[in-house]
Image (cartoon, grey):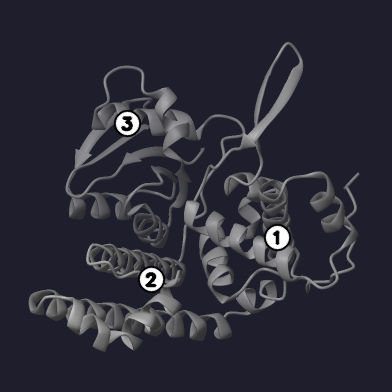
């Protein structure tokens, strides 16, 4: 007897599950509460449970797997075409059940607690950096209204503001001067929190063998390495490095008809945060590498700088996948061979 396949639509309080009973052929589309769902699945024989890769999906994947079931996570865009009528919990559960049984359906790797925690640190840091930038830009704009301008750049600009405090105290009203000092303290507080998060990320980077392995790739530092390993999950989820690069949106968009395929601009699919880190690392490689490889020199000669940066970022992602998938160390002079 084949294992039962379940389509589970998760939410905060209401959970809808669709399946076909293997013994009776009965179609079941049942609504559960949170505790009722866990108890029901704990009593059922091992089966395959498909979920949409949405909020809390990775926690549910670990929980259901601990109950003895196989768990499959699907991207939302692969499920939506199978919603036949109006979008409801029951229709979504049936669409998940239908989608997971399609041949060649791509899945999402379930993340571990450590991987989710690392991505959470990155998200918190990213938001704090955004807040810091907003605070600095607002401070510049307010001071400019009083005729004060400063050097470009966050570090240089803040240093000049602090060096000219005596001058600003004479030029600004008393209320504005108090606000200026409060704003500088807030920026310092944000900077301290960002540095603390980076220290935690750096400590995790040193303890993770995968992060250390891919950090040897030029352009991949501790931030990119930890974010990439946590986002990748299980390297076996992707068949090749190009598939991983496509997952990150670092490949050209394809459009074709009549047997002719045209390549367009970068697809920009996937996680924009990790893609940004990789492209920034690629720019560093293009600007600071003393002995570029022949491939890098050739692409810089024939393509614009931004296009070359994306190409280098895509190559970095493919190289990192190969290191993690095959368990090999990075070699600068390695030449890949196309499999037969």
**Mark 2 or mark 1, which is nearer the start of the sequence?**
2
Residue 296 placed where, x, y %? 82, 57
Decide: marks 1, 3 in contact (CB < 8 A)?
A: no
Label 1: element kind: helix
Query: Is residue 105 found left or right of 326 in the rendered image?
Result: left
Measure how far apart labels 3 and 2 are at the Cα level: 34 Å
Give the residue drawn at x 63%, y 79%. Answer: 209
The residue under label 1 is 316
**Residue 305 position in % (x across, y down):** 70, 51
If you read the primary sequence from the N terminus, does the residue marked by circle 3 or circle 2 appear first? 3
Residue beneath disc 2 = 125
Q: Residues within 10 Å of mark 1 (few under 14, many from 20)?
A: many
* Residue 140 x, y percent position in the rendering: 31, 67
User: Would residue 52 be seen by someone viewing this image from the given angle?
Assistant: yes
Q: Give yes or no for contact between labels 1 and 2 (Cβ–Cβ under 8 Å).
A: no
**Which comes before the other along the chain, label 1 or label 3?**
3
Residue sitting nearer the eye, 36 or 313: 313
């Amino acid at each position: 007897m084949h294992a039962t396949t379940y389509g589970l639509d998760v939410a905060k309080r209401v959970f809808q599950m669709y399946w076909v009973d293997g013994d009776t052929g009965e179609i079941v589309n049942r609504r559960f509460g949170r505790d009722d769902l866990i108890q029901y699945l704990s009593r059922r024989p091992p089966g395959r449970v498909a979920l949409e890769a949405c909020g809390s999906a990775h926690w549910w994947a670990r929980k259901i797997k601990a109950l003895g079931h196989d768990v499959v996570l699907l991207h939302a865009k692969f499920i939506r075409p199978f919603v036949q009528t109006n979008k409801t919990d029951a229709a979504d559960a049936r669409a998940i059940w239908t989608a997971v049984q399609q041949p060649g359906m791509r899945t999402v790797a379930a993340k571990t607690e450590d991987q989710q925690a690392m991505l959470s640190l990155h998200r918190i840091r990213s938001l704090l950096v955004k807040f810091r930038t907003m605070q600095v830009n607002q401070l510049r704009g307010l001071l400019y209204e009083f005729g004060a301008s400063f050097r470009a750049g966050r570090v240089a600009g803040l240093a000049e503001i602090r060096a000219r405090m005596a001058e600003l105290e004479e030029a600004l009203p008393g209320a504005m001067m108090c606000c200026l000092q409060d704003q500088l303290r807030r920026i310092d507080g944000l900077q301290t929190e960002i540095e603390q998060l980076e220290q935690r990320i750096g400590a995790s980077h040193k303890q993770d063998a995968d992060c250390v392995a891919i950090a040897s790739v030029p352009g991949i530092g501790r931030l990119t390495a930890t974010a990439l390993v946590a986002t990748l999950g299980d390297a076996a989820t992707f068949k090749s490095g190009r598939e991983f690069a496509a997952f990150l949106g670092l490949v050209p968009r394809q459009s074709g008809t009549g047997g002719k395929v045209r390549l367009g601009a970068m697809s920009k699919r996937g996680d924009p945060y990790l893609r940004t880190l990789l492209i920034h690392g690629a720019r560093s490689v293009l600007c600071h590498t003393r002995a570029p490889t022949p491939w890098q020199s050739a692409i810089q000669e024939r393509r614009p700088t931004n296009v070359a940066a994306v190409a280098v970022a895509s190559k970095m992602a493919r190289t990192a996948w190969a290191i993690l998938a095959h368990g090999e160390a990075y070699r600068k002079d390695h030449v890949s061979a196309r499999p037969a």
